[in-house]
Image (cartoon, helix red, strand yellow):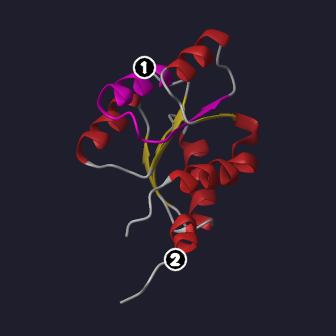
């Protein structure tokens, strides 16, 4: 049986849910996350993302603010109604100050500007991983 040290556990690949309506952006992000060893499930709308969350619990959600029908803050609100602990990273390029304030009020884990997502994502995941409990 493999023994995991606390340090190894925090570096373990994460199971991510990416909610992004732009197919090209979603695939670029999923490829980048995969290159770091993370397993990424893509959903292209807030509704589909919430349906996935009703069945599965990823290690973290990566969420675009601008989505059709239910926007990212609305998705975050629904996530927080049932799960206060699930880490949620919001990506934004066009969020208003009000949307950012509401996301913070709802307990978003990280907010990353879209042009810098790939640059800062590893750091954000490291912070999330450092908060994970040791499975032993």
Image quadrant holding the C terminus, namely: bottom left
Image quadrant holding the N terminus, namely: bottom left
Q: Which residue is at a point 35% across and 25% down the rendered structure image?
A: 78
Q: Residue furthest bottom?
A: 1
Q: Are there few (<14), some (14-19), or many (20+) residues within 10 Å of tag 1?
A: some
Say which of marks 1 and 2 sits in front.
Answer: 2
Q: What residue span does the magenta drawing correspond to?
A: 72-92
* Residue at image mark 1: 74
Q: Using residue 99 as the reference point, say whether residue 72 is left or right of it.
A: left
Whole-percent x, y for residue 100 in the image: 62, 19
Which mark identifies residue 5? 2
Whole-percent x, y for residue 10 in the image: 55, 64
Q: Using residue 6 as the reference point, say whether residue 121 is left or right of it.
A: right
Rendered image quadrant of residue 82: top left
Using the image, determine if residue 78 lies above or below residue 122: above
Residues 47 and 74: in front is 74
Q: Which residue is at a point 44% across and 57% down the rendered structure image?
A: 133
- Magenta stretch containing residue 77, yes or no? yes
Using the image, determine if residue 70 lies above or below residue 27: above
Compute the Cα span from label 1 to label 2. 38 Å
Circle 1 sits in a helix, a strand or a loop, which is it? Answer: helix
């Amino acid at each position: 049986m493999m023994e995991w040290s606390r340090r190894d556990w925090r570096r373990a690949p994460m199971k991510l849910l990416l909610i992004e309506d732009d197919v090209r952006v979603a695939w670029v992000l999923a490829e980048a996350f995969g290159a770091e060893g993370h397993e990424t499930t893509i959903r292209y709308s807030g509704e589909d993302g919430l349906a996935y969350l009703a069945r599965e619990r990823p290690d973290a959600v990566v969420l675009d603010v601008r989505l059709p029908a239910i926007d990212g803050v609305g998705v975050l609100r629904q996530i927080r109604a049932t799960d206060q602990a699930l880490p949620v990273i919001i990506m934004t390029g066009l969020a208003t100050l009000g949307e950012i304030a509401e996301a913070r009020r709802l307990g978003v884990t990280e907010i990353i500007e879209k042009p810098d997502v790939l640059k800062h994502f590893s750091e954000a995941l490291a912070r999330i991983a450092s908060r994970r409990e040791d499975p032993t």
